[in-house]
Amino acid sequence: MEMQVLSLDQMLPPEHVARVVWAYVEQVDVGPLLAEIRSVEHHAGNPAIDPRILLGLWLLATIQGVGSAREVERRCEEHTAYRWLAGGLTINYHTLSDFRSAHVAFLDRLLTSGVATLLHQDLIMLDRVAQDGMRVRASAGASSFRRPSTLQKCLAEAEAHVQALKARADADPGAGSRQQARLAEERCRRIAAALAQTQRLAERRQQVEAEKGVKAKEPRASTTDPEARVMKMPDGGFRPAYNVQLATTTAGGIIVGADVTNRGSDGGELTPMVEQLGERYGVKPRQMLADGGFATTDDIQAMHADHQVDVYAPVKDAAKKRAAGIDPFVPRRADAEGVARWRQRMGTEAAQAIYAERAQTAEWANAGMRNRGLYQVRVRGLAKVRAVVLWYVLAHNLLRAVALRQHAAATGQ
């Protein structure tokens, strides 16, 4: 037997990724998070946990593919790296869970500032960016989707249940019905939100019917997560999901833009992403690489006319047109200027070589997130899902930034 007396710092290996995480957290401006803390010195309330600790814990957990607040709480008691970051504190999983999804604006600013620093240090360039969409399962089951008529009935029943629970709580305050009433009220709010979503979907589908003359199906919404939508997944099945949009630099592999939508198609997503990049960094990419799902003629023309961005995306059914003796890269009579240039551009070997960088950039970034567990989100609503996605983006960029700086130091650049 051997007894060793070691501090937490001595127990953690010098090269452990937790030290990289903490070195990053130390230089982050957490002023906006500190301003939200109401428990201050000389006033009532338990001492608040430093947000740097929570930030470091979730970055490490995301890097290691841990997405459960309960698991992070357990590791803060048993795992050396998490104990080192937490400074030996015991952190409740409710605190961890709330912190993860409550600070979307702060996480978004971290993404912008981190990329801006890399641009300033000439470690990446924003000239060429690859965009791709990734379907992520929502925290809702297919059976939770209801038609408007069914939602109306469910809402009436839920409201009657709330009134009954409140009456029981008033008659017997010790019966514990108030907690049940609060849960029932939350269910009422979710059903009402789902009903509002079906109304929006109905208006949108009426427009589609008017434009295409095709009868659309009756809209449905989830009583569990009203903002989730049923989408076609990579395996060909249809499940409740969100559409995660990521923009990655081809040089350096840094994710520079991220968004979450509940639209099942990638069509029309190029323009919002380019506008987002312009707002973040004051400069737009010169070239956008995307797969065929993004290649709508309206978006390609908007990229050319409004943003002066060249789109590199495959021409639809090019192989079939060649087989039929049609040159798919010859501009059509109805093509706008930007679309005509896109067709001609994609017929060149230079454009094909540039487009080949898309898979090794955008899909590589997506694969890294999948490897860290981004298959399904356990939070509900677009805002909270976006917060979770931003954690994955920040974790990816942190590791890439370290690799880029090490490469620059090794090569003397």
Image (spheres, rainbow, N blue to C red):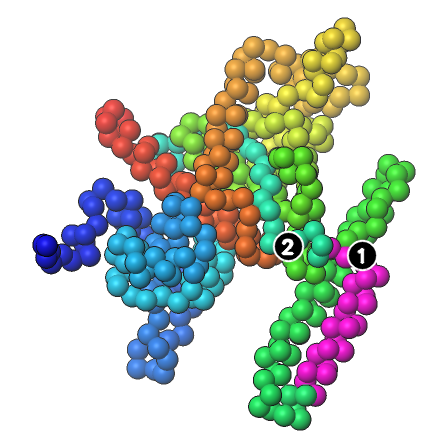
Q: Residue at coordinates 45% horizontally, 66% vertically from top-left?
A: 94
Q: Residue furthest top?
A: 325
Q: Is residue 160 magenta?
A: yes
Where does label 2 land, which residue? 140
Q: Where 293 sits versus 198, above or below? A: above
Where does residue 239 sit, x and y in percent of width and height? 67, 45
On the question of residue 145 being in view, the answer is yes
- Quadrant of residue 40 in the image? bottom left
3D distance between C-alphas at marks 2 and 1: 16 Å
Horizontal relation, residue 209 to residue 58: left or right: right
On the question of residue 256 being in view, the answer is no
Q: Quadrant of the C terminus?
A: top left
Magenta-highlighted residues: 145-167
Where does residue 29 sit, x and y in percent of width and height? 35, 56
Front residue of this view, candidates 97 and 322 = 97
Where does residue 379 sit, x and y in percent of width and height? 55, 56
Where does label 1 land, which residue? 147
